[in-house]
Amino acid sequence: MNQTPNSPDPAFEQPAVITVSALNQAVGRLLERSFPLTWIAGEISNFTRASSGHWYFTLKDDAAQVRAVMFRGRAQYAGFVPREGDKVEVRALVTLYGPRGDYQINVEAIRRAGVGALFEAFMRLKEKLAAAGLFDEGRKRPLPLFPRTIGIVTSPQAAALRDVLTALRRRAPHVRVILYPTLVQGQLAAARIAEAIDTASNRAECDVLLVCRGGGSIEDLWCFNEEVVAYAIANCHMPVISGVGHETDFTIADFAADLRAATPTAAAELAATPRGDWLASLRADATDLRRALRRTLDDAAQTLDNHARRLQSPSARIRQQRLQLLALSTAMMHANRAPLNTARHTVERLGGRLAARRPDTRPVRAHLAALQHRCTVNIGNGLAQRRKALQALAAQLELLNPQRTLERGYAIVTSDKGAILRSPGQIQPRATLTLRLAEGSAQVQVAAVQASLE
């Protein structure tokens, strides 16, 4: 290879030089590509909440630790503020903080340790109850338009109860409120909540039932994720509104209820329409009704005026109708009389023509009577002659009747097949024969056959 005199030897070229910032950026991109979002469990240490709203802390276990940051946009949805020593699980992206060159994790979500197992249990129960049809939209009942009594299932000491009562007092002070007290946290809370819902359902004192509780961790709200609570809500006789936790909290009770509210206060607002709204609506309806009634009356008055202008005096109307009736009566009389006269003349003319053309049937009737007498006599004579001939033939037939021969002591001999036997050659010894006599028949067996008696 030819080289110019001033070109350096490739073997002695120096490698490219990069800055620290470029190095840290390259390492950060490598870490982010190599480690996708991952759930990491550990203990909170050195937790700091900056004025910007970002969270800085160290996530550690018994053998190692890692720096972590959770920016304000993610931290506001955490649902709780972790404290020193809390066991947590974070969903984080492994990266590198370029200015210091520190390896760290950017936290996207955080939850208390063990929440993952609770979430799996939550999803399994949700799928089970959905398959059983508890969450079907077809079984959801509409809320009453004008509830007179609202039931509340919650703890008497809960802040949610004060919020609900305040909202109902402000929006619908006329509505009666019944409290069904129960525990809303702890191991026995689920059974107590279901018992309170069943009590409200059996008493049937209210038109709609609120099941509510303030916000808290998933462990605090877990009693509303129990199967017994879901079935109690589904079997309740009145519509149920679930207002458990905050907007981001979802429980099994929310899916089983007829309507979910983001908060207890929102549940109260959904249960009762503000009294002012109803009064305003009634006032608007009354205004519309008055306008419609005034318009109807105006139309009726105008119609009455039109009819009054067309109205005729009753006496004049009667005289006019009397003249019309007389004219119609006269016309009907003439119309009926003319056809009758015409028909009468026609009948008389046809009667005269019929009398002129009708023949004299008396000779024909006399001749017909004579013929009838002759036929009667001839038929009688013919029948008498045929009766005598029939009697003679019957006497001859009686002489040839075989029964008379049998009555004189003779018999007819037949074989077992019914053939009449006339000669000894047709008979075999020990054969069974049938003798037909004048009265009945007899079967005999041949002992011997003799050809001739001579």
Image (tube, rainbow, N blue to C red):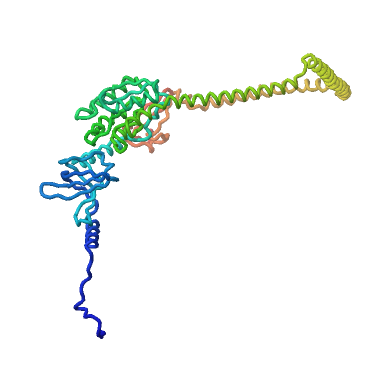
Query: Count the marks: how many?
Result: 0
Does residue 390 appear left or right of residue 430 in this picture?
right
Q: Residue at the location (40% across, 31% down)?
A: 413
Quadrant assignment for the C terminus: top left
Q: Residue furthest top?
A: 315
Whether residue 360 is visible to the viewer of this picture, yes or no, is no
- From this view, report whether residue 360 is shown above or below residue 14: above
Q: Position of residue 134 (x, y in %)?
A: 32, 33
Does residue 301 appear left or right of residue 66 in this picture?
right
Q: Nearer the viewer, residue 134 or 187?
A: 187
The quarter holding residue 47 reads top left
Quadrant assignment for the N terminus: bottom left
Does residue 389 appear left or right of residue 133 in this picture?
right
Q: Residue at the location (82% across, 23% down)?
A: 364
Whether residue 349 is visible to the viewer of this picture, yes or no, is yes
Q: Position of residue 8 (x, y in %)?
A: 23, 80
Q: Which residue lies furthest to the front in this view?
A: 51
Q: Position of residue 117 (x, y in %)?
A: 20, 41
- From this view, report whether residue 26 is shown above or below residue 125: below
Does residue 30 appear left or right of residue 149 in this picture?
left
Q: Which of 96 and 390 is in front in this view?
A: 96
Q: Where is residue 210 in the image (x, y as percent from the top left)?
A: 33, 27
Q: Which of 143 and 345 is in front in this view?
A: 143
Q: Residue at the location (45% across, 23% down)?
A: 408
The quarter holding residue 238 reads top left
The quarter holding residue 87 reads top left
